[in-house]
Image: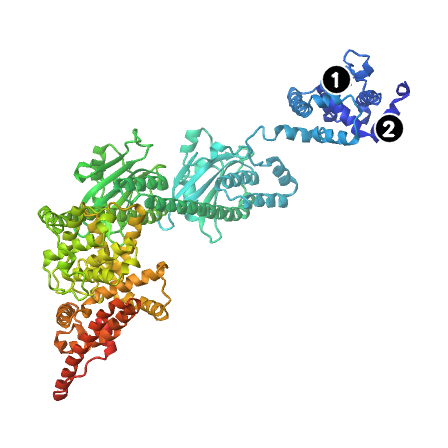
Amino acid sequence: MAASRLDFGEVETFLDRHPELFEDYLMRKGKQELVDKWLQRHSSGQGASDLRPALAGASSLAQSSARGSTGIGGGAGPQGSANSHPASGGGESAGVPLSPSWASGSRGDGNLQRRASQKELRKSFARSKAIHVNRTYDEQVTSRAQEPLSSVRRRALLRKASSLPPTTAHILSALLESRVNLPQYPPTAIDYKCHLKKHNERQFFLELVKDISNDLDLTSLSYKILIFVCLMVDADRCSLFLVEGAAAGKKTLVSKFFDVHAGTPLLPCSTTENSNEVQVPWGKGIIGYVGEHGETVNIPDAYQDRRFNDEIDKLTGYKTKSLLCMPIRNSDGEIIGVAQAINKVPEGAPFTEDDEKVMQMYLPFCGIAISNAQLFAASRKEYERSRALLEVVNDLFEEQTDLEKIVKKIMHRAQTLLKCERCSVLLLEDIESPVVKFTKSFELMSPKCSADAENSFKESVEKSSYSDWLINNSIAELVASTGLPVNVSDAYQDPRFDAEADQISGFHIRSVLCVPIWNSNHQIIGVAQVLNRLDGKPFDDADQRLFEAFVIFCGLGINNTIMYDQVKKSWAKQSVALDVLSYHATCSKAEVDKFKAANIPLVSELAIDDIHFDDFSLDVDAMITAALRMFMELGMVQKFKIDYETLCRWLLTVRKNYRMVLYHNWRHAFNVCQLMFAMLTTAGFQEILTEVEILAVIVGCLCHDLDHRGTNNAFQAKSDSALAQLYGTSATLEHHHFNHAVMILQSEGHNIFANLSSKEYSDLMQLLKQSILATDLTLYFERRTEFFELVSKGAYDWSITSHRDVFRSMLMTACDLGAVTKPWEISRQVAELVTSEFFEQGDRERSELKLTPSAIFDRNRKDELPRLQLEWIDSICMPLYQALVKVNAKLKPMLDSVAANRRKWEELHQKRLQVSAASPVPSSPSPAVAGEDRL
């Protein structure tokens, strides 16, 4: 009851002190109609005296809020129930006194009516706010709405339900933002400039200059210039013509804005390319005269001047009376355009000298602005062209295997860059021939000129069957023969053009641009040609420069594709050749059957377990049976499940792939393998090496000199042989031997490792490569220091992989040099074979390479063999076998044989010295040099 005694002033004072209560109540109880009326009152610019009805309604709301949680109107009204939803209560039902002006949607005086569009916008905004509030509150919040709100809870609710924007402009901007995208055009402010012209001419002129100085778009800049010229000289219409064409070539005055009125807006359709474009030949008409001579022309009556062309007036129906034309120059004084003002207002008045002076002051600024816009447009154009060239490079490197595909990509890019109707590429049959003959041609029609876009790409193998190419046959052949580009702006005026063929083909050719295609060796491989720009203009210098740069990349791409095709054909030929050679390089089935059925002698019968085995005791067939016995004796056939027939075929093929040279032949390979077998079985090295390692070294011994040519690595490097080019100058022959071994293993019916697991096979191939490369003496010198240190210190541990690796390398070298460990008769015979092979290499060095061979390869110095053998034993052989004896004393017989053979060579050397003392001869090279030559 105490609340009923509150008057309006007290309620207002209370609400001023507690605005959050009013905001909270309004957000929960206020209806959309109350919000609309509030917006209407504030948008109509009413004063504070007009807000009293709203404040009265607000006081009623505040009184209801002050009475507690008994609902709206204290529960007296039908909607005053305590269980009402907060969003269901409204201002009117709560007893808010609304004036008739609010109810009718107008001010109290009834003069201001709300517009429907504003009403709908505000209703939409209010609805969006109501939806947001409804989504913010849930049932639990509704049930708590009747309870007194704490300050914390009230602030939380207010943060969730934001209040109304403070201004109507804010509301409208929120309504329009991200909902309606209207086209926006730069305001011309014509009325403002007209006002400045009447009251402040200086400021007017500065405004015009400022407007054009900030515009780098040539289209909008041209439009502004025309509008401002109209304003300055009071012209009814204006036109602007810009100079196009080369400085030293044919020029044209082109206008994209013709007869523009000062009140005409710049619409998007006016900015399209070539819209409303008018071309005036250089020196023709008044415009052409001003452009050519650079003089101002002011004509009171245009029809009285013989230079005036009235064709435009006849077409448009517009009568030209007075006319003022003036050139536009850039900062260098060059004429870059012509401005034309037509019909001074009022009608019939001529342009005055003051008009000329005003234009003379304004147009230099226009010239600077136009130059800047043209430079900006040129830079953007160059950027686009550079990006297009990069895309061309990307296309070329994506496809380098199919000539037709890459040419099609090239022509698509050419049409995109140059915007032409037709693009063609012709390739020469023989680039070395002086006679120009095209063997293949391609053509691509623009989709705008071809009804069937998918089939617009054509290829012809025979040029005679390609009728379209007959049209420009002479031009294409001229470009291919001279290497100079040809740019024909008017085909029918060029004597090289065949007009009759053009009429027969049905395709009318206006302009032609043809350039040569070069390869990386600066040889012409074809020509590229584009016909007819889509805009009807001839190809200009910029088009020619772009096309020439474009064709440079195309030439590289086409050349790479042609080279790829040639390589592909060469590879096919090589495959056929290899197939033929493989057939002749493999053994016959009869040979395989012979050894498959043969009885293999025992090891004792063959004596292959003897370190002092006679290298010349077995014939070629006996060496095959002995090799089979080694595989069986070492248990490799059973362990690795080697097919016996495959093993026989593999051994026979390996034998067949050794050349008939004096020393590095099949016998040498077998002897190296025999010595390895003897060392494994005699010295017990089978306990050090794994079964896979044993298989690798045995196979490595048999294959370590496959396809040896009787020359060393140094000769391959000096002669720049195919092997040196293929494998380089480091261990050239050894890499070739390994690859040849792999080729044999990969031949059908020769893979003796077929039943190994993938890991065993991978490990075995790696070990096989290491074993064969270890026979290179250069690698031996690199690794022997490590081995000698391990042996001298007794630090070797065969469980360590690196120690076993270096040990296997030393074993391979010891077996490769094993002839020096054999009895003297055998050792000397082998030395003579090696020397004879070296002499043949020296003969080739002298005859083919025109070089003087070193002593060991010089047949004329063969009497120095004992000295060279002593150097060979002392520097290479003796240290190696001494180290192996330290590892296993069972190899001491090998070292003893080396020492015995050295004594024999020493005796021969002393006899030679005695003979030399009796008859002096020229001094021989120093031992160090001779040793290096031996390597």
Residue 429 appears in the rendering: no
Which quadrant, please, contains the N terminus?
A: top right
Point out residue 267 in the picture as x, y percentages from the top left corner: 51, 32
Point out residue 192 in the picture as x, y percentages from the top left corner: 63, 37
Which residue does the image show at 20% across and 44% down from the upper left? 474
Could you tell whether 640 is left or right of 395 in the image? left
Q: Residues within 10 Å of mark 2 (few under 14, many from 20)?
A: few
- Which amino acid does the dot numbered 2 rest on? Thr
Could you tell whether 390 is left or right of 172 in the image? left
Which quadrant, please, contains the C terminus?
A: bottom left
Point out residue 204 in the picture as x, y percentages from the top left corner: 61, 43
Could you tell me how far apart the alpha carbons at marks 2 and 1 are, in whole angstroms? 24 Å
Residue at disc 2, secondary structure? helix
The tag on residue 13 is 2
Could you tell whether 108 is left or right of 853 in the image? right
Residue 317 appears in the rendering: yes
Residue at disc 1, secondary structure? loop
- In the image, 153 versus 760, the foreground residue is 760
Which residue does the image show at 42% across and 40% down from the upper left? 254
- Above or below, 136 against 580 in this view is above
Point out residue 520 in the picture as x, y percentages from the top left corner: 28, 53
- Above or below, 631 against 260 in this view is below
Q: Residues within 10 Å of mark 1 (few under 14, many from 20)?
A: many
- In the image, 493 versus 6, the foreground residue is 6
The tag on residue 90 is 1
The tag on residue 71 is none
- Above or below, 115 against 301 in this view is above
Do the residues under discs 2 and 1 have CB atoms within 8 angstroms? no
Which residue is at the far top? 78
